Amino acid sequence: MLATQGFHSFIEQHRLSLKLRPILVGELYLARKLEHPVYIFKNGFFYPVINEGSVPSKDQINALIKNSHKEVYVYPSDVVEIKKNLETALVKVTRSLSVGDPLENGTKDMKLLSLNLSGLYQNPHSDEMLMLQFQSTQNLSKFLLENKKFQPYFYQNLIRENFHFTLSQPMLSSVLLLSFLQSIHLFHDKEVENLFLASYLKDIGISMIPGDKYDLKTLTTRDQELFANHADFSFDLLEGRVPLSKNYLTIIKHHHFLNDKMKDLLQRDKKKMKDPEIIFGIESTLVSVFDILVAMTSERPYRKSMSLYQSLELIKKMMADDYPQEFRALVVFLKQFYKN
Ligand SMILES: [Fe+2]
């Protein structure tokens, strides 16, 4: 049971709602001495759970996670301090990935990168934050290629962190993509690296969508439009700001092209599917396939997850006609990857 330490008056509650800002529970690991208490939001009220002047302990953080709290609320001065510590930690681990224990370094790097991604969603126009994500991801791709045998471990470990899917999905789909591309030996390391970056950054356009929309069961037409346009938003946010060539930015812009095909399949629509206006290559197809695979095999607040087998049945319909060999290689690869 989580110890809440008192309830503030209604006036004080109102003041807190104006002052406090949400952070992810995992970010509390980066907190040093807190200037103010940490709050949870429950049944419409803020309750303090960690005292001012203290350093959040592992037990306190674990208790919050155990009680299904994904976010906590802190004062702006503590947010600034925590975000600064997070960036410092990410820079440090990114620069020394190859020094010391690879399992520990890779695990830590992927966790910090995913936590830091929430900061980029909040400040998508910050060049500094975007470049930190870009360079850290670039270094991580080299590290992952050098540490092939640990890829399944890193993947499973990130799933266990139980981050919101907007933070975990970019990394999970990109790790699977990189691992598959490495296994089929058709691409140079530099191409794999760029595809890893394109895959990881493809969803930063969701930063243009209000956070409370992600977990809704039903969306208004306006919200559906926003979601449908997130790939365009990603392209607009990245063009001219990251050193990725047009080819990779185009992959980002169209990374949902297979989803329309999937919607028709899921709705068992008998009408003939429209031919795409652009011919998509194997790179675009694979970026899209791994995105769909990770999404389908993970649970959402509004739907259950599908099994790997069920997901592959759908993916088969989406890609096997155009890329039969690659689809067969994908099945073999996934069996091996999930066995490890
Ligand atoms: Fe997407």
Image (spheres, rainbow, N blue to C red):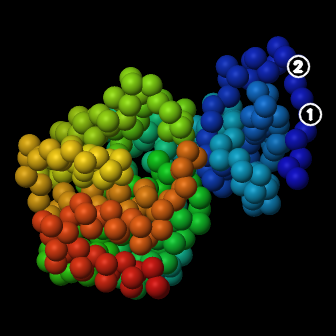
Extreme residue toward the top, this view = 11
- Which one is nearer the viewer's eye here, 284 or 90? 284
Asked which quadrant contains residue 325, the reply is: bottom left
Return the residue found at the far front: 270
Residue at the location (15% across, 67% down)? Answer: 321
Location of mark 1 (residue):
6
Mark 2: which secondary structure? loop
Residue 21 appears at what percent x and percent y? 63, 31
Direction from residue 319 to residue 148 in the image, left or right: right
Which amino acid, mark 2? Ser
Mark 2 and ligand 1: say if the CB distance to the nearest ligand atom is below 8 Å. no
Cα separation, mark 2 vs mark 1, equals 10 Å
Q: Residue at x 54, y 65 (%)?
A: 159
Q: Position of residue 82 (x, y in %)?
A: 60, 45
**Residue 190 visible from this viewpoint:** no
Q: Quadrant of residue 215?
A: top right
Q: Secondary structure at mark 1?
A: loop
Q: Mark 1: is the Cβ under 8 angstroms from ligand 1? A: no
Is 335 rendered above or below residue 58? below
Q: Is residue 65 left or right of residue 170?
A: right
Tell me the number on the disc at residue 158: none
Q: Residue at x 16, y 74 (%)?
A: 324
Give the residue drawn at x 66%, y 38%: 78
213 relative position to 293: left or right: right
* Amino acid carrying mark 1 in the image: Gly
252 is higher (above) or lower (below) than 314? above
Task: From the image, tell me which residue sits under label 2.
Answer: 9
- Disc 1: CA contacts within 10 A as few (<14), some (14-19) or many (>=20): few
* Residues at circles 2 and 1 in contact by the CB criterion of under 8 Å: no
Characterize the local packing of mark 2: few (<14), some (14-19) or many (20 or more) Cα atoms within 10 angstroms: few
